Image (cartoon, helix red, strand yellow):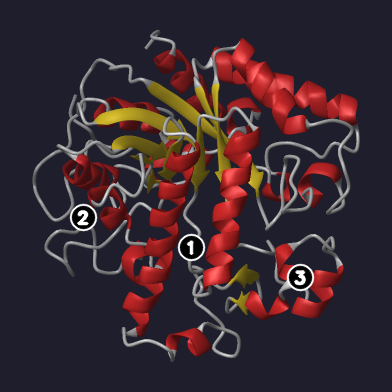
Amino acid sequence: MKLYKYQTKEPIFYFNTKKQVEIPDKYIEKPVRGMWVSNVNNIDLPTTEDIDNYRIKVIEMLDTAKSFNINTIFFQVRTTNDAFYNSMLNPYSRYLTGKEGKKPPFDVFKWIISEAKKRNIEIHAWCNPYRISADSNLSIEEYLKTCDDLNFAKCHPEYIVLDTKGKLILNPAIKEVRQFIIESMKEIVENYEVAGIHFDDYFYPYSGLDLNRDDSEQFKKQSLNIDDFRRENVNTLIRDIHEALKEVDPSIEFGISPFGIWKNKTANEFGSNTDLACTESYNSLYADSVKWVKEKYIDYIVPQIYWDFEHKIAPFADICDFWVKVCKDISVKLYIGHGAYRLGKDGGFLNKYEVVNQVKYANQFDVVKGNVFFTYKNFIEKLEAYPGMCELKKLLNGRN
């Protein structure tokens, strides 16, 4: 089926070409059908302050996943240098219990895993490696006062850097920070029956580092340029986590969901067919996601292709094609990250079939092994995304 811009007869072309985008009529089911469950700022689930309500909401989440034929959940367990699980290294999250360090009535994460197993759903522990705070309204000193004494950042304020908006993150350039993150990831897989550890797209911050509180001291001590230095800090962490997890249990998977654009072809011959104006993870976040695939630092990758087919500078099809090329003939599995949260809001996403069409397009490629949708609340809310999510439900259940 040839694609046209929403409610028009204007063809959708691949970026800077006159080649019209086509999708298969049939849906090809892939082994992984996943969704993210976002716990930072309680996006998808409430706190356990009303534990009976929390139980109800979790069961609803799992049953919803089952009804959509979802078999993999990326459940956020480390939001802001904290834990949604019993930890000797990190305090319980304020987004779990209402106050950082406060214990829930029982081991919530263990219970969620057991309930997921009953429904044949795998759980991957979704972690943010560096983030300390999710907002920027407080100074370092003020924010640390809200943290539990176990919080690594409170114990080591000298390891904190700031982004330009005032948010706190752990300094990726410090060896002790990297080792702490590695130990935190090992602790999860040593104590919980998870299928994998999962990182999202936050490495060096999107807004950049505050020049008054950055990694310049560490940078002075080596010979790389600043960009390569920062990329190497992240590369080292990714490689070392992968190795550490395999030592604990070779069956544990380590995967990352990076920002969808690595480099733009207009700037780099091997990049995606996207405009020069597009943000690049390689240069903005210092996240060399292609290297992680080529060097097999990860077991799977879920690029966040959160743009629609008719996007003017970053069309879905062009970016999907790029990742298919990157992952061809390599053991790292490719799952496509879809921005279901955008359904019904703007551009091509006004078309209720936008995500359905994306899934059909992506799944025509043998190298694509699955699809993951952001975020869970869009599966249950009857707002703008609802018509599109109804169509997605039909598709994933083989009724479209």
Residue at the location (17% across, 62% down)? 265
Point out the frontmost of discs 1 and 3. Answer: 3
Answer with mark 1 or mark 2, whichever residue precedes in sequence: 1
Left or right of residue 130: residue 317: left
**CA separation in Å, label 1 and label 2:** 21 Å
Where residue 74 appears, x then y in whole percent? 54, 35
- Above or below for 92 versus 266: above
The C terminus lies in which quarter of the figure?
A: top left
Q: Amino acid at mark 1?
A: Phe
Which residue is labeled 2 in the image? 272
Q: Residue furthest front?
A: 247
Residue at the location (40% across, 46% down)? 304
- Above or below for 2 versus 305: above
Label 1 Cα neighbours within 10 Å, binned few <14 / some 14-19 / many ≥20: many
Label 2 Cα neighbours within 10 Å, binned few <14 / some 14-19 / many ≥20: many
Instruction: Please give the count of numbered marks on the rendered protein.
Output: 3
The N terminus lies in which quarter of the figure?
A: top left
Left or right of residue 68: residue 294: left
Can I make out residue 344 in this image? Answer: no
Which residue is labeled 1 in the image? 203
Answer with mark 1 or mark 3, whichever residue precedes in sequence: 3
Which residue is labeled 3 in the image? 155
Q: Secondary structure at mark 1?
A: loop
Q: Amino acid at mark 3?
A: Cys
Answer with mark 2 or mark 3, whichever residue precedes in sequence: 3
**CA separation in Å, label 1 and label 3:** 22 Å
Residue at the location (36% across, 70% down)? 232
Q: Secondary structure at mark 3?
A: helix
Where residue 148 appears, x then y in whole percent? 84, 60
Which one is in front, 26 or 311? Answer: 26
Q: Secondary structure at mark 2?
A: loop
